[in-house]
Amino acid sequence: MLNYRKSRWSVLSASSRGNKMELAYYPGCTLKTRAKNFETSAIAAMSALGVNLVELPRWNCCGTVYSLAEDDLIHHVAAIRNLIRVKEQGKNKVVTLCAFCYNTLKRANLVMKDSPDKRFAINNFMNEEPDYAGEVETVHLLQVLRDDVGWERIARNVKHPLKDLKIAGYYGCTLLRPQSAAIDSVERPRVLQDLIKTLGASAVEFPFATECCGAYQVVDNRDIVAERTAAILSSARKNGAEAIAVSCPLCEYNLRQTQRQDTVPMPVLYFTQLMVIAFGLDAITGGFDENSMETRAWLKGKGLIP
Amino acid sequence: MNEEFVKRALVIGGGIAGIQAALDIADAGYEVILVERSPSIGGHMVQYAEVFPTLDCPQCIMTPRMVEIVQHPNIKLMTYSEVKKVSGSAGNFTVDILQKARKVDTKKCTGCGTCWQKCPEKVTSEFNAGVAKRTAVYIPFPQAVPAKPVIDTDHCRYIDYKEYMAGGKKGKKPPECRICEKLCPVGAVDWEQQDEIIREKVGAIVIATGFDLMPVANIPEYAADPDILNGIQFERLLSPGGPTAGVVTRPSDGKIPKEVVFVSCCGSRDPEHGVPYCSRVCCMYLAKQALLYKHAVPDGQAYIFYIDTRSTGKGYEEFIQRVVGEGVLYLRGKVSKIFRDGEKLRVYGADTLSGKRVEIAADMVVLGMAVMPSEGTKELLKKLGVSAGETGFVLESHTKFRPLETSVEGIFVAGMAQGPKDIPDSVAQGSASAARVLTLFAQGSRSQKESVRV
Amino acid sequence: MRVELSSKKLRSNFVKKVAELSGQNLYLCYQCGKCSAGCPMGFAMDILPNQVIRLIQLGLEEDLINSKTVWLCASCLTCTARCPRGVDLSKVMEAVRLLTLRKNKNYIEPSKMSHDTIAELPQIALVSAFRKLTG
């Protein structure tokens, strides 16, 4: 059963009454430290769309990765605690920006939903927390944009269409795999391309959009990750891309920091930063100072930021 | 009271299994109605270039049998027809058959070919599996039986014009055309011809509806690309009577491919994303296609990615070893991804025997797509009340001892409709199903109480 | 040198543990190699993913011990997504890693990492690396 169906809770109907809609928002650690620009640009862009991202109180680190061992329940606790916090708010949905957090929360939630034995053991362990059975839906911001806000509404907010820009949308792994957590088709996703087109730019199709960047191997095997990012960026470039839009702070770091000195640098930015520019919002909210020098130079050269 | 059996048979499907069944029953002295939904009989076999392991030309060996069908005094051939409704029971079925309007009076038509040579409208050719075009008035292939054309009313300019003038279409006015009608020397074009429902009474039915290939789009990790073909498309390129006269060229740019990759098990043996069963014929036909490619392009290189090589028929293993011996490289592993890279197609595969990940910059890729029951089988089986198995193929009464009997007495199955198989087995089942029909006829009658009604 | 196979070897503790920790039936794998063909880290691996499965199927623990392959896995799940038999290789890789890590043998040593390296890397990279590659 694919998980990217339209959410039952539609933001659109309330927004059409002119109200700001609220969504519980889980930032995750990196969005508060090295990827602040992802958060500030997202909050600003969503606010312009009439959606208020309300940070979850008392959230904790999700653990970054979903533990794959059958007997390892303790590593799900950190993720599930956050979902219990959402439930306590009286909400049944939480949105994340970081693709790693999305995948971890989503898969931990499926454990609570689908495995009665594990659910019992984990609820028992967290005896000071209310019992939880997977009632909260974790979504990624791209799903909210596609299913709850809708491309038409986004298009109406575009003040400065990103004309003549050729941007490749890079998905990485955790948004699309495994199938049970996928926000779109595992092999042929469309959501980033659709967003890029809605913002007025040309969405570059390239065969490595869903290839892994190397993720945490960057800690101990930086040269291997450099090979991966070189392959991804050169494929994007070969297919006409002048910049690459991502939705994960680890992908952003890997693609930005492991680019070889002898290659033409490729600007890397978050898809929410593209929205800030296209919506004509204050460049401060984009947080472009935290992107690479090349990215800023490219944006300035195109007259997109002052 | 005893119901006398109607000693006429209905064969649904004009491929090799259906043709064999029809000929056997007719030769035994009984009337057969052979219903085929496309404009000509022949099925998939006539689409192939050469058949394994003998490398016979299928059109050459089939056309005499196809002509036998149309000339047989006991066979009523109904092409461009479909079974619409069935009722009754073994020995006494009533069948409503839709004879679609060809818009051509076949009694007047001489098959001279003027109309299809002059028709200006080009449509994707079904017979050529999409790698070539045909005209709106057409015969599917030169050896078609009957050799009388059909007007494809979905794509005919004059039909569009008539609909437009009747207020049914919007936009630009289509031309009035009617070139076929104007040029036909015997005035055989009949725009007023209507679809007809013809009711027949038969005593037995043979389902021989064959197969279709799984769509290439079912494997999203392989790009949608003009130079990535399925097996039947490649056969059309190899075929001397095909759109390129047997010269293997890339659909994208017409160049001759020098590196061709063949991929086995595309969708088959894949319970997760495809069908769980083995399609049985791909190992053999991919080997044959690789060999024919090498004969056509002697300096070309063929690669076959395989998991196992299934070559169980007579002469099959020897054929595989011949292909291997002529330099076709067999790589043991599946292909994970195929994408376009400039002029080439990058194929990412593995060779588990050497333990290497391999990458090939291919000019063309041929996919061994899974075989599935032909389109429309599900709906037809519902009409007949015949059960299908989990995989959609007709469910036989008993796997070992009653492979041709279905869940409805008096209705039999032959060929790929029952499951994946090669040509000799399809023909054998065609004959075997005829034997079942003849046995039923020999019983002569049945008490009404015993009949199971459809 | 011949590798001796026996029911004892095929049902060794190692094999049982991998099956238990991963929750996978390794005999489903028919060694088609699609995982290896699509693995993004495969170019750097000494033993390919499908060979890892094969070695476990044959109970050849010794051959796996010195291999870097499971440590190079990035848990990208491309193998899992494409496997025609539905074998979740990412779980098998994790199981093999855990059999070492749970013996308190770290693959990377946080205490030996330079201060500069730790400062330069974003915490998402550090935390996930420590989760996957330390005990």
Image (cartoon, coloured by chain):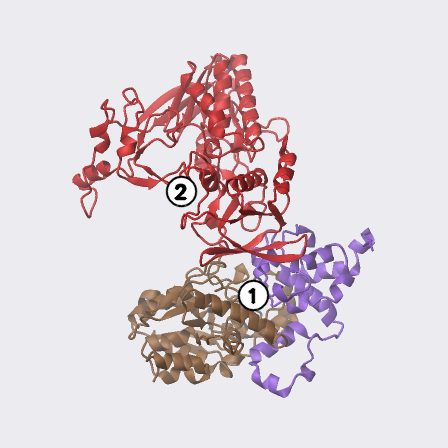
Q: Check disc 1 and report the residue beneath it.
A: A107
Distance between mark 2 and mark 1 Cα atoms: 43 Å
Q: Using the rendered image of the protein, determine whether residue A130 is visible from the camera's viewpoint.
A: no
Q: For the C terminus of chain A, which image quadrant?
A: bottom left
- The x and y percentages for residue B323 are 61, 40
**Residue A24, image x and y in percent?**
45, 74
Q: Nearer the viewer, residue B92 or A211?
A: A211
For mark 1, give the secondary structure.
helix
Chain identity for the colour brown used in the image: A
How many numbered discs sit on the rendered protein?
2
The percent coordinates of residue A25 (x first, y second) are 46, 75
The quarter holding residue A217 reads: bottom right
Q: Is residue A20 above or below residue B333?
A: below
Q: Residue at x 40, y 71 (%)?
A: A242
Q: Which chain is purple?
A: C
What residue is pinned by disc 2?
Answer: B130
Give amino acid for label 2.
Gly
